Image (spheres, rainbow, N blue to C red):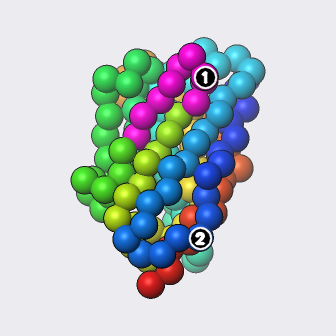
């Protein structure tokens, strides 16, 4: 099994930046491809970005493409989400997730507890 822990959330003004981290532990072979999701208050969880095991394959939701960058450092068992040009609509709890797939995480088996990101106008 895999444990995932997010960090780096906080309060930031619109136009600012944050970098989220997701640290993996346990049987990390169960978390190869990884992804970021977010859930705003009163809304359903939505996909943000995903990255393959080696970092060569990435995908982004249209709402964040060009502003957010997903990356990973396998030596540290850590995934990152660099968020630039933040908007109030980016306010949400951000979750990291792990998938057994190598490149495209069509299924996620492991989830972190989330980190709050609040963007003020």
| x and y percentages locating residue 52 in the rendered image | 40, 25
Tag 2, which secondary structure?
Answer: strand
* Residue in the picture at 57% in, 16% down: 75
State which quadrant residue 67 falls in: bottom left
Mark 2 is surrounded, within 10 Å at the Cα level, by few (under 14), some (14 to 19) or many (20 or more) other residues, namely: some
| Residue 108 is a magenta residue | no
Task: Give the numbered dot on residue 76.
Answer: 1
Along the polypeptide, which appears first: circle 1 or circle 2?
Answer: 2
Give the left or right position of residue 64, taking residue 42 as reference.
left
User: Can residue 108 be seen by looking at this rendering?
Assistant: no
Residue placed under numbered mark 2 in the picture:
11
Q: Is residue 94 above or below residue 105?
A: below
* Residue in the picture at 53% in, 70% down: 12
Q: Is residue 21 above or below residue 86?
A: above
Q: Nearer the viewer, residue 81 or 96?
A: 81
* Residue in the picture at 42% in, 75% down: 14
| x and y percentages locating residue 85 in the rendered image | 34, 65
User: Can residue 104 be seen by looking at this rendering?
Assistant: yes
Give the left or right position of residue 38, taking residue 63 as reference.
right
State the quadrant of the N terminus.
top right
**Tags 1 and 2 touching, CB below 8 Å:** no
Which residues lie in the magenta part? 70-78
Mark 1 is surrounded, within 10 Å at the Cα level, by few (under 14), some (14 to 19) or many (20 or more) other residues, namely: few
State which quadrant residue 62 falls in: bottom left
State which quadrant residue 25 falls in: top right
State the quadrant of the C terminus.
bottom left
Q: Is residue 41 above or below residue 69?
A: below
Q: How many angstroms separate mark 1 from mark 2 (CA)?
A: 26 Å
* Residue in the picture at 59% in, 70% down: 11
Q: Nearer the viewer, residue 120 or 116?
A: 120
């Amino acid at each position: 099994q895999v444990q995932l822990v997010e960090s780096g959330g906080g309060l930031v003004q619109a136009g600012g930046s944050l970098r989220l981290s997701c640290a993996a532990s346990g049987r990390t072979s169960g978390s190869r491809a990884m992804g970021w999701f977010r859930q705003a208050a009163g809304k359903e969880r939505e996909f943000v970005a995903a990255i393959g095991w080696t970092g060569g394959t990435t995908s982004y939701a249209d709402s964040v493409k060009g502003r957010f960058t997903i990356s990973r450092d396998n030596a540290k068992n850590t995934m990152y989400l660099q968020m630039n040009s933040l908007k109030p609509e980016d306010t949400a709890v951000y979750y990291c997730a792990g998938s057994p797939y190598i490149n495209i995480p069509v299924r996620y088996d492991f989830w972190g507890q989330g980190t709050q990101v609040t963007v003020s106008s």
